[in-house]
Image (cartoon, helix red, strand yellow):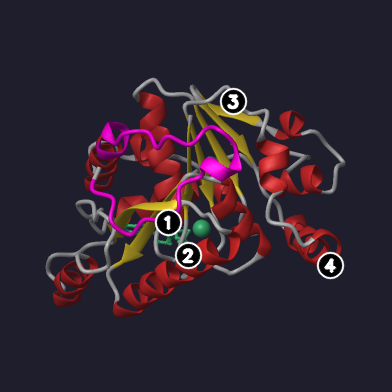
Amino acid sequence: MRKIAILGFKGGIGKTTTCVNLGAALALRGHRVLLIDTDTQANLSISLGITDYKKSLSDVLVRKAKVEECIIPARKNVDLLPSSLALFKVQQRMVLEMAREEVFEEIFSGLNDYDYQLLDCAPSLSLLTINSIVYVDEVFIPVSMEMLAMAGAEQFIGYLQNISRTLGRAATIRLVIPTMYDPRRRVSKQVMKLLKDLGPRVTRPIRDDTQLSEAPGQGKTIFEYAPRSRGAVDYARLTETVAEMSLLTSTNGKSSRLPLQKNDSQ
Ligand SMILES: Nc1ncnc2c1ncn2[C@@H]1O[C@H](COP(=O)(O)OP(=O)(O)O)[C@@H](O)[C@H]1O
Ligand SMILES: [Mg+2]
């Protein structure tokens, strides 16, 4: 099983869009996928058109529910562990009462029935984000084609290195995913050029596509909403790249977790 967090310091850079559509495309290829929403804005469930649910990640964190009770079948081969606004309060309690970075490892440890777990994360330095970084093996960083998004990605990579040093371990940044790429805009080309110097592998860009921004409003993935769109083509190609990447070998408990690597050309 591969555990991947879609992470970045900025909002609006395509984290949720990538999580939904990468997950959907992996499922279409026959993989079993669990999408985990760790963002208090609960955008994953909205994007998938799932609004009628009672239990969410926050109930698991306060031990009101078992994780299995909160998982919703979202599509063929796709399950969802949704978030809710309540997660915001729970997170504050987590900081005060348990301040621990291994809670996700404890509550998700039994969820082995998947080929992929994808975590959608908030654009903040919260305890939930740190839990995500500690729990997963791989991190993908979407970067939209703006200089400030580029700066955010740089800060984030530095931050991950610090965490790695502090905790003695952290996930590997395996992919930087350029998003909202528009070849007519000079800044798109400038950011693409700068991304190459960041260190981690940079994928081919996800192009700017209005249909990608319309699909969540209909509660649909891009493959349901506009299967012939640029967005569908680009996310299918990204998925191929992800599926072809080799598995990181980390299974024997914490000490075997790989340290953060800036250069991973696999
Ligand atoms: N490639 C793209 N082209 C056009 N719009 C996009 C693209 N990727 C994402 N969007 C839109 O941009 C907004 C922010 O994307 P989102 O995935 O929610 O970012 P994040 O989760 O990082 O905050 C959303 O309205 C989304 O639909
Ligand atoms: Mg989001």
Which element carries disc 2, helix, strand or loop? helix
Q: Earlier in the sequence, mark 3 or mark 1?
A: 3
Q: Front-most of 96 and 222?
A: 96
Residue at mark 1: 260
Label 3 to label 2, Cα distance in Å? 26 Å
Q: Front-most of 57 and 196?
A: 196
For the residues carrying marks 2 and 1, which lies nearer the camera in this image?
1
Q: Front-most of 265 and 235?
A: 265
Q: Which mark is residue 112?
A: 3
Q: Which mark is residue 160?
A: 2
Seen at 78% across and 47% down, the residue is 61
Label 2 to label 1, Cα distance in Å? 8 Å
Magenta-colored span: 241-265
The picture places residue 32, in percent across and down from the top left corner, at 48, 24
Q: Quadrant of residue 151?
A: bottom left
Magenta span: predominant SS is loop
Residue at mark 4: 96
What amino acid is found at the position of numbered circle 4 in the picture? Leu
- Give yes or no for residue 264 being in the magenta stretch: yes
Q: Earlier in the sequence, mark 3 or mark 4?
A: 4
**The C terminus is located in which quarter?**
top left
